[in-house]
Amino acid sequence: MIAVMDDAIQHDTQQYTARPPRRAFNIYGAAEYCSCRCAAIEEAIRDGRLRARRLGRGFVITREDLDAFIDFLPAIEPHIPPSIAARRAARAVNATPAHAAKNRGVS
């Protein structure tokens, strides 16, 4: 009974102590949010690819602008080194179906 009450009290206090999600970031916070360098954020602002607002000497970037910026970035294709691609192609040519291997007595 006491454990149930403690859980209920703890649950009630969490709603008051939990930090609200951030609505705006400075350069450092935006770089941390995007998992990139501060210089990349500053460059995107200078180039006009990322909207930011001036506040004193610094910048304020909203979460919506960061999300739009991230969504606009081009997706890249995974890079497969030529040596690995050649090995995969060789394996595909030499591969035998499982039922054929059983018929020949190969396990």
Image: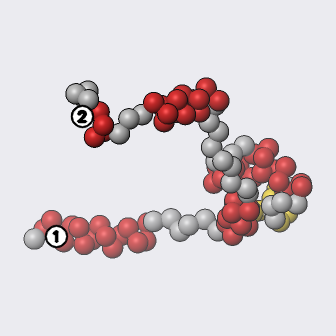
Q: Kindly indicate the quadrant of the structure image that contains residue 68.
A: bottom right
Residue for badge 2: 103
Residue at image point 35% right, 39% down: 97
Q: Please tell me the numbered disc located at residue 101.
A: none
Q: Amino acid at mark 1?
A: Val
Q: Nearer the viewer, residue 62 or 54?
A: 62
Residue for badge 1: 4
- Say whether residue 42 is left or right of residue 1: right
- Say whether residue 36 is left or right of residue 102: right
Where in the figure is residue 82, as x and y percent of width and height? 65, 30
Vertical position of residue 92 compared to residue 53: above or below? above
- As drawn, the residue found furthest toward the left would be 1
Mark earlier in primary sequence (1, 2) = 1
Does dot 2 land on a helix, a strand or a loop?
helix
Asked whether the viewer can see residue 97, the reply is yes
Does dot 1 land on a helix, a strand or a loop?
helix
Asked whether the viewer can see residue 55, the reply is no
Q: Amino acid at mark 2?
A: Asn
Where in the figure is residue 8, as x and y percent of width and height? 25, 72
Q: Kindly indicate the quadrant of the structure image that contains residue 60.
A: bottom right
Where in the figure is residue 50, as x and y percent of width and height? 80, 61
Give the Cα distance between marks 1 and 2: 64 Å
Q: Nearer the viewer, residue 13 or 45?
A: 45
